[in-house]
Amino acid sequence: MNFHTLAARGGRDVPSASRPLTAPIYQTNVYVFEDMETVESVWEGKISGYVYGRYGTGNHSMLEDLVAGLEGAEAAVACASGMGATTALLLGLFAAGDHLVAARDLYGTTASFLTSEGKRLGIEATFVDATDAGRVLGALRPNTKAVFVEALSNPLLLLADLPVLAPLLERRGVELIVDASMASPAVCRPIEHGATVVMHSLTKFISGHGDVTGGMVLGRKEAMGRCREAMIRAGTNLGPFDAWLAVRGARTLGVRLERQSATALSLAQFLEPHPAVARAHYPGLATHPQHALARRLMPGPMGAILSFDLRGGALAVGRFMARARLMEFAPSFGDVATTWTYPARTSHRRVSDEDKAAMGIGPGLVRLSVGLEDPTDLIEDLTQALE
Ligand SMILES: Cc1ncc(COP(=O)(O)O)c(C=O)c1O
């Protein structure tokens, strides 16, 4: 072969009698076939295999198998982001004329996606206080296709009453969709409590190291087949390297969340009686308004997120920002480093002051995503920042 052919084709097949312990990254956007029958059989799902990057690679299947196992789901579809997963879900499961009942404190972009793109597609959403099962059930219509809630709400860590909702919705043939990004399957597995669809921003705890943007929708095989087709057509696919990184992160999800949740509980217990703090919000505190339900839905670790109201309001938050050293301001959550955010001016900045007040999101509310640092160092940082 000549130089250019050698450059284009050389070094592709390296024989090995062993296999790698860690899966390789299939950084390819297409696969090669030996005959047409095989191409067609793979395409039609008769035999397993891969065809084209947007449809998925081995890295996607590994990630989907892994998280589906952790969630107890039949099938999963990896997507480019949490919002990519919501897109696949909406396009895959809904049709024009369908109605949706959604939690009023759903992640802001999910809510605006429902009221903008969702509305243009002919899907109507009614927002209710999802902690009140009566209100959720009262909002159902004959054309209600699904109820969409979060396992743990942002930023007040409130819970939807899945054990009450699930059987009633099942009887009416209404899907129960749960965004469990704030919890992760190490904390809460909604399918065990009757959810029919779970979605995740993999960007958060599952990947866990602040280096991946990804999402996933999980549920019944047939429904996920429809979401996968929608994902493929919409092109909201995850890259293979991100899928590989998410698998690597998810390997330690359990130990991370055990440690991060234990630290979160100690910080919440430190903050609750602190004179600068009006109220601490954490499901593991006996004062949490749904503590009993929290124990039922999260029998192990109760999550790495907590929030607290500073008595001094916005002014005190400004001082906290200037003084915090270890805890960095970053409008996301789920990293191994502890970060904090200010919901009134980040996630809920587009919500009116009246609605924020109705939801209990005050000007002094700070949300912490607790990482893997030594709790003593975090308490020391909180002590000096709150002084
Ligand atoms: C609860 C929740 N769901 C979904 C999303 C969207 O995820 P992504 O940013 O990966 O698109 C976020 C993002 O912050 C979130 O907090």
Image (cartoon, helix red, strand yellow):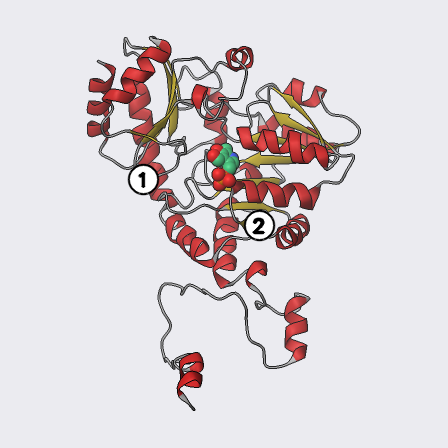
Q: Secondary structure at mark 2?
A: loop
Image quarter of the C terminus: top left
* Label 1 CA crowd tier, 10 Å (few <14, some 14–19, many 20+): some
* Label 2 CA crowd tier, 10 Å (few <14, some 14–19, many 20+): many
Residue 264 or residue 365, whichever sits in front: 365
Residue matched to label 2: 236
The type of residue carrying mark 1 is Val
Question: Between tags 1 and 2, which lies in front?
Answer: 2
> Where is residue 355, by image quadrant?
top right
Whole-percent x, y for residue 92 in the image: 68, 46
The type of residue carrying mark 2 is Thr
Residue 48 or residue 86, whichever sits in front: 86
Residue 66 or residue 233, whichever sits in front: 233
- Tell me what residue is drawn at x 52 percent, y 48 percent: 80
**Horizontal arrangement in the rendering, residue 63 relative to residue 191 (left or right):** left
Q: Secondary structure at mark 1?
A: loop
- Whether residue 256 appears in this view of the structure is yes
- Tell me what residue is drawn at x 36 percent, y 63 percent: 22
Disc ID at residue 235 = none
Q: Pointers 1 and 2 in contact (CB under 8 A)?
A: no
Residue matched to label 1: 336
Image quarter of the N terminus: bottom left
Whole-percent x, y for residue 244 in the image: 42, 56
Q: Is residue 232 above or below residue 354?
A: below
Whole-percent x, y for residue 273 in the image: 30, 11
Whole-percent x, y for residue 259 in the image: 31, 36
